Amino acid sequence: AQSVTQLGSHVSVSEGALVLLRCNYSSSVPPYLFWYVQYPNQGLQLLLKYTSAATLVKGINGFEAEFKKSETSFHLTKPSAHMSDAAEYFCATMDSNYQLIWGAGTKLIIKP
Amino acid sequence: NAGVTQTPKFQVLKTGQSMTLQCAQDMNHNSMYWYRQDPGMGLRLIYYSASEGTTDKGEVPNGYNVSRLNKREFSLRLESAAPSQTSVYFCASSGGYSGSGGTYNEQFFGPGTRLTVL
C-alpha cells in the first residue's frame, strides 16, 4: 500500500532562510505527488503537484519540489522564508483507487 | 464562485446526539470527499463519491453515513455521536482522474467544521 512519511512534525527557520520540508513516499508506478498548505483555521490548498511531466515542479508562493525516484523523495523548498509562510504543510500521494494518501503534516514556524 | 462551502463551522454535541454536516460545491466537479483531521494524523478519508449516485468507504467510515444528494451536494451524517468523533471535518471536491496517462485533478477544500462531542 502507498504511504507518505513527512520528517519532522515541526520545522523552525528564520525569516529569509532556506525552507526545506521533507517527504518520502512508498513506491507507486507512476507516483502522483502533491504538496498542500493549510493556514490557521482554513482548509487546504494545493501548492504544487508532480504528475511525471518534469522532476522539478514549481508551485505558488515561490515554493518548488524535486521528485527523486532513486530516493523516493519529494522534498519541498523555498529559498527565502517569509513570515506569511507560517502554516502546516502536507505531502500526499495517490493510491491505486486514485484516492489521496496523506502524510501527518509539518508545521513551519518562521522566526523573526 | 464560492468553491466548496460547509455548514456549520462549529458544533458541540452530546454523546449519542445526531447531526448532519452539509457540503456543496459550485465547480461542477464529479468527485467529492469527506475527511477528518486530527492532530499528528494528517487527513483521513471517511467516505467519497466518485460521481453522482455513487459513494464508497474510505479509511475510517465507521460511525458515519453519507448522501450524495446531487452533483453539487454531499452530506455526512453522524447517527450517534461519540467523543472519538471530536475532530475537524473537511469536505473536498475534484474533477477526478482523467484516465490512463492523464493528470489527477487537484482537490479543492472547504473551510472545515470543528466538531466537539462531549
Image: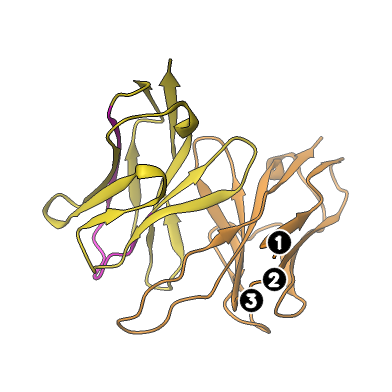
Chain colours: A yellow, B orange
Residue, disc 3:
B55
Foreground tag (3 vs 2): 2
Displayed quadrant of residue A95: bottom left
Report the front residue among B19 and A51. Answer: A51
Q: Chain of mark 1?
A: B
Displayed quadrant of residue A94: bottom left
Q: Mark 1 and 3 residues: CB-CB less than 8 Å, in contact?
A: no
Answer few, some or many: residues within 10 Å of disc 2's Cα (few below 14, many 20 plus, some between 14 and 19): some
Determine the CA span between mark 3 and mark 2: 19 Å
Q: Work out whether B47 lies above or below A48.
A: below
Residue at (60, 76) in percent of width and height: B29
Q: Work out whether B86 lies above or below B17.
A: above
**Residue B35 lies in the magenta stretch:** no
- Residue B73: x and y in percent read 74, 71
User: Is residue A91 something that shows in the picture?
Assistant: yes
- Residue A34: x and y in percent read 38, 56
Determine the CA span between mark 1 and mark 2: 7 Å
Secondary-structure class at tag 1? loop
Answer few, some or many: residues within 10 Å of disc 1's Cα (few below 14, many 20 plus, some between 14 and 19): few
Nearer the N terminus, badge 1 or badge 2? Answer: 1
Residue B2 - label: 1
Amino acid under disc 3: Thr
Residue at (49, 31) in percent of width and height: A84
- Residue B46: x and y in percent read 61, 59
Foreground tag (1 vs 3): 1
Amino acid under disc 2: Asp
User: Is residue A104 something that shows in the picture?
Assistant: no
Determine the CA span between mark 1 and mark 3: 24 Å
The image quadrant where one finds the N terminus of chain B is bottom right
Q: Chain of mark 3?
A: B
Q: Mark 1 and 2 residues: CB-CB less than 8 Å, in contact?
A: yes
